Image: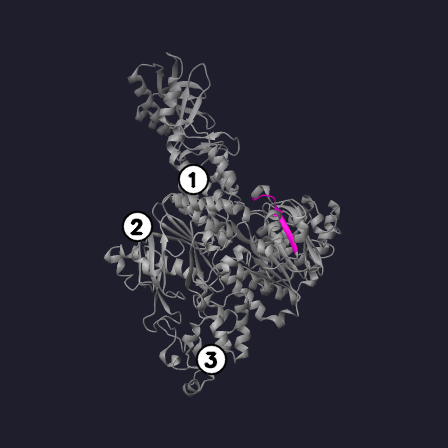
């Protein structure tokens, strides 16, 4: 029933069957009461800022965390005594809570998909236990001999066979041969073999001259093979052990009719001493296993080829080599042109058309020809002069480590293999291929016994990653390069791998970053999490996830101060009778309208030969002056094309960036029309916890000036800086303007508690006495954007700065909200608001805007506002590229570039380019099916 959780009935419900929240008032929640059924898949939906996250994370998860802390010892609780209880009457039936949010909250340059999911830990153990080392020279397996293996070799011979056990004599540097032989006599040895001839040691001392080139071997024992004689086996074992000792790790067994066989108890082959496999050998976070050149980072600071040759369309004669331009360095170009004539180097051919051998000559030179490498060696030899140091820094950048080729491990770690694959092979393969390899592993009885549990854990976790649509990633992929949605699904797969039961999982839009085709697989993962016996609570806007839910909770009716109420609870069928925004869009009563006509391009530029990651040497044309959507299933190559090629390549062309550029041949077309480039991603808007939206969009400057102009401020000598929490003066010095104090926890995550001096208000009392229209600066920071626009309606400068936040659908956030509490999608929209607020400046330029899934965290109703804002940027004469899966956005694009057809190795091809209408007229790829439904609706 939709109304089964009315407040008056809540107290009668059983906490064993429901998670009961009574009177929640956190943030904008208006005394909200709700009973969430346990062990069900429940979707919480509503407009952005309606209170979904306040209910799911700030109320339910916060209480689950607090209750966990209360279960700790009194010693642990003394650090947590002031941990705030959510503002709620009571919550009953709370299970242990696991929150999985969108934010990529790791910036660790060593963290990878493999380490985050713990799969790499299991792989290290697997290779250390059952991996076999192979020599890179002969390809033979490396192993060390033991007394047991030597005895087994001897016992395998025919009964009654005679043999000699010998040890090579290693002469000591300061000891003569006579002294060596006397030492052997004193140890009880009587015979020695010289060049395969057996002699008594005493006779050799008396009458024979031993040369330095002679081969000397000590006779340890003479024996006969006796299969059933235990005493004989003990004797042979003792002799072999003695031979290993005297031979310093080597033992020789000689059967008269056969060649000598040398055994070694050292781990060596082909003259190379190998490291025995241990867990640390495969750890790039450990100095023992890390590549010595890059120290386990996979990248080093070196000469960046893209900076040296920024425009690959130019020839050497036209000045392709940037560092050879200018009067002082021109001589290097002239010398190369003159010297390379003997090798028939094509000086007039564009760089991208040069063969690999010709590029090799240009970079590394040859006898009598000085290339780019020799040029930089010369510059490095002159770094005592400032101008050369400046020049060197201009062409430096992060490049792949030449020794480990980006794998981060020392080279000999790759000599250890299981079924012909090394650990580096596995981490560089797409996860779906690694899973296939693990499933097909054929192990012998011993290996199976040792590794059964490890293989099962690895297979389970890889399977979950594949099921949540991440089969295209590699285990070596850096965590900080993942999108918010990818990171969240990795955390989800990790949680599934731990197979907890009876827990409460709270997820923040797990469908972000997923093509509609892959959403079904995600739903199967969520339902299996529920079927294990967990309560799965999902904050979500995706229609398919809502349809799969056991129950929907709709919060609203609007955002910010106009939200925070429970407007519906029940099944999807029951939602259809409701009047909320969610119901209207699901029923089709409200929709995002398709534009009547598509805009025409004002030129274009083209990426030729894009082949980074899985891109299949494609040529992609990007129109200028319109909105282009880059689409395709997860892992099809969208992010690679935009983030790794288009963005860094155009940035370098404009001399505004130094990121490493992915592999492509050249840029063509009207790139000269582009005067600026902005990448609007989901990364936090500020590193400091004092950073917030109102300072980011420069609206706080006007507010501070307004308060400094008040009469009381003038009397006290307060300047605008006194109303800043970033500098000394008016801010609270206990918390340094943060409003919270950090308590470091040695055994768990640090916690943040409200500052006791300023009670979270951030400023000193005398500053708070200054008021404008009855409100002090702290109260202003607690206002929502929407309310503050109304409050400052007479202050046009401030309102003009704040309006873009309202326009992008962020009217519900508070002015002083810490940037690290914003979701990835919110941070992205704050950046968009910043560019909108620069309207008049932008209209003089032609900026290329790149958006990475801007619909993250947006309800249908908010997407309408967002797209109006992006269109406003295009109206000012700019170009927009959007990486997007949301069909509501794709249908509004002027131009679509669809990559695929699949993800990973089966992706990276150009499936389609053209208008939405042209796309639905063909049947290639997956996107057209979903777009067809929307355009016909």
Residue at 32 percent across and 60 percent down: it is 8
Q: Earlier in the sequence, mark 2 or mark 3?
A: 2
Q: Where is residue 555? Give x, y as percent.
A: 43, 60
Q: Where is residue 267? Give x, y as percent.
A: 42, 33
Residue at 43 percent across and 58 percent down: it is 568
Q: Specify whether residue 384 is painted magenta.
A: no
Left or right, 150 with reference to 646: left
Mark 1 packing: few (<14 Cα in 10 Å), some, or many (20+)? some
Distance from label 1 to label 2 (Cα)? 31 Å
Q: Is residue 223 visible?
A: yes
Distance from label 1 to label 3 (Cα)? 58 Å
Mark 3 packing: few (<14 Cα in 10 Å), some, or many (20+)? some
Question: What numbered label is drawn on residue 720?
Answer: 3
Q: Which residues make up the magenta segment? A: 895-903
Q: Is residue 164 above or below residue 779?
A: above
Q: Residue 723 versus residue 899: which sits nearer the camera?
A: 899
Distance from label 2 to label 3 (Cα)? 55 Å
Q: Earlier in the sequence, mark 1 or mark 3?
A: 1
Question: What numbered label is drawn on residue 311?
Answer: none
| SS state under label 2 | loop
Question: Which residue lies under the disc numbered 1?
Answer: 460
| SS state under label 3 | helix
Residue that lies at the very extreme toward the left in this rendered image = 74
Residue that lies at the very extreme toward the top in this rendered image = 160
Question: Which residue lies under the disc numbered 2?
Answer: 16
Q: Where is residue 722? Give x, y as percent.
A: 43, 79
């Amino acid at each position: 029933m939709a109304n089964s959780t009315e407040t008056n009935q809540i107290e009668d419900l059983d906490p064993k069957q429901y998670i009961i929240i009574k009177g929640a008032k956190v943030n904008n929640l208006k005394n909200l009461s709700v009973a969430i059924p346990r062990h069900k898949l429940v979707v919480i939906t509503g407009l952005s800022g309606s209170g979904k996250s306040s209910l799911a994370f700030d109320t339910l998860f916060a209480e689950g965390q607090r209750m966990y802390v209360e279960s700790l010892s009194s010693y642990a609780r003394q650090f947590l005594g002031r941990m705030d209880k959510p503002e709620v009457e009571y919550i009953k039936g709370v299970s242990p809570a696991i929150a999985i949010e969108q934010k990529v909250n790791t910036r660790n340059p060593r963290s990878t998909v493999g380490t985050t999911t713990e799969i790499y830990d299991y792989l290290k153990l697997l290779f250390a236990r059952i991996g076999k080392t192979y020599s890179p020279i002969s390809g033979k397996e490396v192993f060390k001999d033991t007394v047991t293996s030597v005895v087994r070799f001897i016992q395998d011979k025919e009964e009654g066979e005679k043999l000699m056990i010998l040890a090579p004599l290693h002469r000591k540097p300061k000891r003569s041969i006579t002294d060596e032989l006397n030492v052997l006599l004193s140890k009880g040895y009587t015979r020695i073999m010289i060049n395969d001839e057996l002699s008594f040691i005493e006779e050799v001392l008396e009458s024979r001259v031993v040369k330095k080139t002679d081969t000397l071997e000590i006779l340890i024992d003479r024996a006969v093979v006796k299969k059933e004689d235990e005493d004989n086996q003990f004797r042979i074992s003792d002799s072999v052990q003695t031979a290993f000792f005297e031979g310093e790790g080597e033992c020789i067994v000689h059967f008269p009719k056969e060649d000598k066989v040398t055994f070694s108890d050292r781990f060596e082959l082909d003259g190379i001493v190998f490291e025995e496999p241990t867990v640390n050998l495969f750890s790039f976070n450990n100095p023992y296993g890390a590549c010595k050149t890059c120290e386990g980072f996979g990248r080093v600071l070196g000469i960046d080829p893209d900076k040296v040759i920024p425009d690959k369309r130019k020839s050497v004669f036209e000045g392709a080599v940037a560092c050879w331009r200018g009067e002082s360095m021109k001589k290097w170009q002239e010398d190369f042109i003159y010297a390379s004539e003997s090798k028939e180097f094509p000086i007039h051919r564009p760089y991208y058309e040069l063969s690999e051998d010709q590029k090799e000559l240009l970079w590394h030179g040859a006898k009598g020809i000085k290339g780019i490498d020799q040029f930089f060696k010369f510059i490095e030899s002159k770094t005592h002069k400032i101008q050369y140091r400046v020049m060197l820094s201009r062409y430096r950048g992060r490049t792949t480590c030449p020794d480990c080729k980006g794998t981060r491990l020392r080279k000999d770690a790759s000599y250890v293999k299981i079924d012909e694959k090394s650990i580096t092979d596995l981490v560089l393969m797409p996860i779906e291929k690694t899973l296939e390899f693990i499933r097909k592993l054929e192990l012998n009885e011993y290996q199976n016994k040792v590794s059964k549990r490890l293989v099962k854990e690895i297979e389970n976790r890889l399977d979950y990653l594949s099921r949540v649509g991440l089969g295209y990633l590699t285990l070596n992929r850096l965590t900080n390069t993942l999108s918010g949605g990818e990171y969240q699904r990795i955390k989800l797969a990790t949680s599934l791998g731990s197979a907890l039961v009876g827990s409460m999982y709270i997820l923040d839009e797990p469908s972000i970053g997923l093509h509609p085709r892959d959403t079904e697989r995600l739903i199967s993962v969520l339902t299996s999490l529920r079927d294990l016996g967990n309560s799965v609570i999902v904050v979500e806007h995706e229609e398919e996830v809502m349809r799969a839910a056991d129950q929907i909770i709709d919060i609203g009716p609007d955002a910010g101060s106009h939200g925070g109420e429970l407007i519906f609870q029940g099944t999807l069928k029951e939602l259809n009778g409701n009047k909320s925004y969610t119901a209207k869009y699901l029923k089709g009563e409200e929709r995002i309208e398709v534009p009547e006509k598509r805009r025409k391009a004002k030129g274009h530029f083209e990426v030729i030969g894009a082949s980074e990651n899985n891109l299949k040497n494609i040529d992609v044309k990007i129109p200028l002056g319109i909105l282009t959507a880059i689409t395709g299933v997860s892992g099809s190559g969208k992010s690679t094309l935009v983030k790794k090629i288009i963005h860094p390549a155009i940035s370098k062309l404009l001399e505004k960036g130094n990121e490493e550029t992915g592999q492509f041949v050249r840029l063509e077309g009207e790139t000269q029309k582009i005067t600026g480039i902005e990448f609007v991603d989901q990364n936090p808007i500020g590193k400091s916890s004092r950073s917030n939206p109102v300072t980011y969009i420069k609206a706080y400057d006007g507010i501070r000036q307004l308060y400094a102009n008040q009469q009381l401020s003038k009397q006290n000598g307060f300047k605008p800086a006194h109303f800043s929490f970033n500098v000394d003066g008016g801010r609270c010095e206990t918390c340094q303007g943060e409003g919270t104090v950090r308590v470091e926890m040695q055994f768990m995550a640090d916690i943040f508690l409200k500052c006791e001096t300023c009670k979270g208000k951030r400023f000193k009392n005398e500053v708070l006495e200054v008021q404008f229209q009855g409100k002090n600066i702290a109260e202003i920071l607690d206002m929502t954007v929407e309310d503050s626009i109304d409050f400052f309606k007479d202050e046009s400068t401030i309102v003009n700065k704040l309006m873009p936040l309202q326009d992008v659908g962020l009217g519900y956030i508070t002015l002083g909200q810490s940037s690290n509490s914003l979701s990835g999608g919110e941070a992205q929209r704050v950046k968009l608001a910043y560019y909108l607020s620069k309207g008049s400046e932008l209209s003089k330029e032609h900026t290329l805007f790149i958006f990475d899934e801007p619909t993250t965290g947006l309800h249908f109703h908010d997407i309408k506002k967002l797209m109006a804002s992006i269109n406003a940027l295009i109206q000012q004469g700019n170009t927009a590229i959007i990486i997007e899966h949301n069909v509501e956005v794709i249908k509004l694009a002027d131009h679509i570039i669809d990559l695929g057809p699949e993800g990973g190795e089966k992706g990276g091809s150009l499936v389609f380019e053209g208008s939405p209408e042209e796309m639905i007229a063909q049947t290639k790829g997956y996107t057209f099916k979903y777009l067809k439904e929307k355009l016909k609706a």
